């Protein structure tokens, strides 16, 4: 069994065929600056539900379930839940906060977005049944850079999640979107994780195979048992080291499938690219099972 713990759904009409524009990870990183006009489609076009393509890709690659969240842009949590409900046995939704700013650029004053967040979390959990908060680019919610001040700004969000004991995801390293690379260093998460030990925190991409970000992510995870990793973009060597230090029980498989990432095909396809690190890490049978589905199943409480 395979659970993909990291998927973004909904796309835009102009992104429905990027076959000639995205072949490698590097094409993906440069997509916004290489095709600035095409990138604008994310901000101007009406989003379209692309979960049929997702489920087809899952079928081709033997993925049973996926934890899904909004792609960056003007996509509502309600739209994500509606799409996930079309495949209730396969797709489990998360809500997101500030992913509109992630795509469009960050507001100078993020206070309104931050103040609205707890209410959005409560309503998405209680009325829509989401299983946590997806990737949170914190600059959408704070413009502080001191870790204690960031943690103070995030407190109402973390206190809300603590009531439900549901997770929040913070990305590490680079993204293809404008600004806020500063927060790709997950060292600030140490303060957040320590203050809210009841809230599981996933450091997505575990540093993306880049040594400096991986070292920080691992250091934060060693100090806080509520910190988890997903394997998106990591290397076999980093994955092996992470398993040996924090255990496979805190690591889960993810692809970062999205309207753009789904076009990557070196080697073969996105799924094969993401599986490479697992193969290179020479996992034992039990480590493999743990990372492929058991950790995600427990963390997102899929058997409830
Ligand atoms: Zn992602």
Image (spheres, helix red, strand yellow):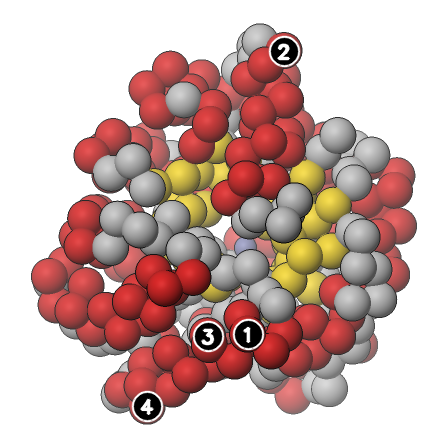
Please determine whether, in this image, residue 233 is positioned above or below residue 94. Answer: above
Q: In front of the other: label 1 or label 2?
A: 1
Q: Nearer the viewer, residue 293 or 242?
A: 293
Decide if residue 52 is on the left or right side of residue 18: right
Q: Is residue 201 left or right of residue 278?
A: left
Residue 121's label in the rendered image is: 3
Image coordinates of residue 236 in percent, x first then y, are: 51, 20
Q: Nearer the viewer, mark 4 or mark 3?
A: 3
Question: Residue 95, relative to residue 209: is it above or below?
Answer: below
Give residue 126's mark: 1
Q: Is tag 1's residue or tag 2's residue first in the polypeptide sequence?
A: 1
Q: Secondary structure at mark 1?
A: helix
Query: How far is disc 4 from disc 3 in space, using C-alphas?
Result: 15 Å
* Residue density around tag 2, few if under 14, some if 14–19, many if 20 or more, within 10 Å: few
Question: Marks 1 and 2, Cα distance to the nearest angstrom?
Answer: 37 Å
Q: Is residue 300 above or below residue 230?
A: below
Which numbered disc, 1 or 3, marks the residue that appears first in the sequence? Answer: 3
Mark 4 lies on residue: 112
Give whichever of discs 4 and 3 has the lower sequence position. Answer: 4
- Kind of element beneath mark 3: helix
Q: Is disc 2's CB within 8 Å of ligand 1?
A: no
- For the residues carrying marks 3 and 2, which lies nearer the camera in this image? 3
């Amino acid at each position: 069994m395979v659970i993909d713990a990291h998927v973004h759904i909904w796309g835009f009409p102009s992104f429905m065929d990027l076959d000639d524009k995205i072949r490698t990870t590097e094409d993906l990183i440069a997509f916004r600056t290489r095709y600035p006009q095409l990138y604008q489609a994310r901000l101007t076009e009406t989003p379209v539900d692309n979960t049929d393509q997702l489920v087809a890709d899952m079928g081709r690659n033997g993925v049973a379930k996926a934890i899904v969240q909004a792609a960056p842009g003007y996509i509502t949590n309600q739209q994500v839940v509606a799409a996930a409900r079309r495949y209730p046995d396969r797709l489990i939704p998360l809500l997101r906060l500030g992913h509109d700013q992630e795509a469009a650029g960050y507001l100078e004053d993020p206070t309104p977005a931050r103040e609205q967040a707890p209410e959005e979390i409560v309503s998405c959990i209680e009325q829509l049944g989401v299983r946590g908060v997806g990737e949170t680019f914190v600059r959408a919610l704070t413009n502080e850079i001191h870790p204690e001040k960031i943690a103070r700004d995030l407190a109402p969000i973390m206190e809300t999640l603590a009531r439900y004991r549901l997770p929040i995801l913070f990305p590490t390293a680079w993204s293809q979107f404008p600004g806020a690379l500063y927060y790709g260093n997950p060292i600030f998460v140490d303060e957040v994780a320590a203050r809210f030990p009841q809230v599981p925190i996933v450091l997505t991409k575990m540093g993306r195979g880049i040594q400096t970000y991986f070292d920080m992510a691992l250091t934060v995870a060693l100090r806080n048992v509520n910190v988890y990793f997903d394997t998106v973009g990591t290397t076999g060597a980093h994955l092996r080291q992470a398993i040996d230090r924090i255990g496979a029980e805190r690591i889960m498989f993810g692809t970062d499938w999205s309207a753009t990432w789904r076009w990557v095909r070196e080697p073969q396809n996105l799924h094969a690219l993401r599986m490479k690190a697992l193969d290179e890490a020479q996992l034992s049978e039990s480590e493999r099972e743990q990372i492929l589905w058991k950790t995600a199943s427990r963390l997102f409480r899929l058997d409830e």
